[in-house]
Image (cartoon, grey):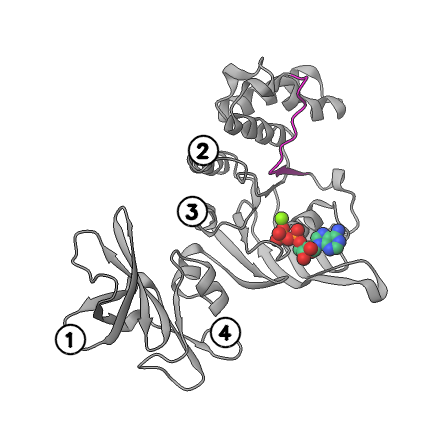
Amino acid sequence: MASISLKNIVKRYGTGKAAVPVIHGVNAEIKDGEFIVLVGPSGCGKSTLLRMIAGLEEITGGELWIGDKVVNNLEPAKRNIAMVFQNYALYPHMSNYENMAYGLKLAKVPEDEIKRRVDKAAKILELSHLLDRKPRQLSGGQRQRVAMGRAIVRQPQVFLFDEPLSNLDAKLRGQTRIEIQKLHAELGITSLFVTHDQVEAMTLAQRMIVMNGGNVEQFGTPEEVYHTPASTFVAGFIGSPPMNLLKNAPNGRQGQILGIRPEHIDLVEAGGWEFMVETVELLGAERLLYGKVGGEDVTVRVEEGQPYPKPGETARISAREDRLHWFHAETGKRI
Ligand SMILES: Nc1ncnc2c1ncn2[C@@H]1O[C@H](COP(=O)(O)OP(=O)(O)O)[C@@H](O)[C@H]1O
Ligand SMILES: [Mg+2]
């Protein structure tokens, strides 16, 4: 097991005039045994960062530490890292046992040690009864677990996951998420998990790195990121539906943006702001009201069972004072 330290990590693809800067100086200190989620929109550089840590991509600038060593120039096989991808690429002609054992065979690990490790991983992943089958005889979720098993048996000091659940349907994604959490609780291996899905990030992370355009916007626990987003980007990206961001709120301040989450706005009889309701979405336990305050879009969340205005009606709403967020209008940074 090991800590990971990113010190001003830079990545440019290509050289000279054709160079494309992709990662602009990322800093992060990941503790031994932590489960970190790297989250951000598609194209923000998550895979690039992960691949640099794995050694699959050259590091243009900065220092990458794993444990007490700088590993910038250490070849992938020597980093003692296991990576799980979205496309798990199991060998179709091998049994699931053989798939999990294959890497260890290549590394000339003795047969009885291989069996011990594969059996243990299979037990943790609840695959013991499926080891003799071929991958095609498994469900998508089970196949992804075989791919994780293949990573576990290597006993790496670091696990890297690149959107491993993206190919699974919603229900299976939820189940596999829970299994990954159990796995981490059991093995305690330092893990870096990439996703573009903020719900996945919020539910899995001990701490999360929110990335945007090759920069780290915020590094914190899910609670910190939700309650004190560092920027309008984070405020809009984390939380569903996203935080309302108002340039001209009735109680606004010159040069500042007011942020208020839909779940922190109440319908009131009098006072507050005038809210023109445009559409209403009925979700199981809540109603989402979409409308306007002044000319600006505002979403309000109303609990099931409460009365709520209909499209075309005007209501009054009040933003909870202790839940207001203020951001610089120009930089988007939290004040
Ligand atoms: N081999 C490459 N050459 C040039 N640009 C690349 C290469 N790989 C990725 N990129 C660019 O780097 C940026 C980040 O890509 P990536 O790390 O795959 O993002 P993410 O995983 O967050 O979706 C994107 O703009 C992408 O087009
Ligand atoms: Mg990616």
Amino acid on which disc 4 is placed: Lys
**Under 8 Å from ligand 1: the CB of mark 1?**
no
Location of residue 40 (image quadrant)? bottom right
**In whole angstroms, how far apart are the C-alphas of marks 3 and 1?**
38 Å
Q: Is residue 36 left or right of residue 276?
A: right
Which residue position is annotated with label 1? 270
Circle on res. 203: 3
**In whole angstroms, how far apart are the C-alphas of marks 4 and 3?**
25 Å
**Which comes sooner in the sequence, label 4 or label 3?**
3
Circle on res. 333: 4
Residue 122 in the image, given as x and y percentages of width and height: 54, 22
Per the image, label 3 sits on a secondary structure element best described as helix
Q: Is residue 127 left or right of residue 82?
A: left
Extreme residue in the top direction: 132
Residue 253 in the image, given as x and y percentages of width and height: 38, 84
Which residue position is annotated with label 2? 172
- Depth check: give the residue in front, 252 or 50: 252
Please provide the residue range marked out in magenta: 81-94
State which mark lies toward you, 2 or 1.
Answer: 1
Q: Is residue 10 left or right of residue 142?
A: right
Q: Quadrant of the N terminus?
A: top right
Q: Residue at x 73, y 21 (%)?
A: 105
Is 85 contained in the magenta span?
yes
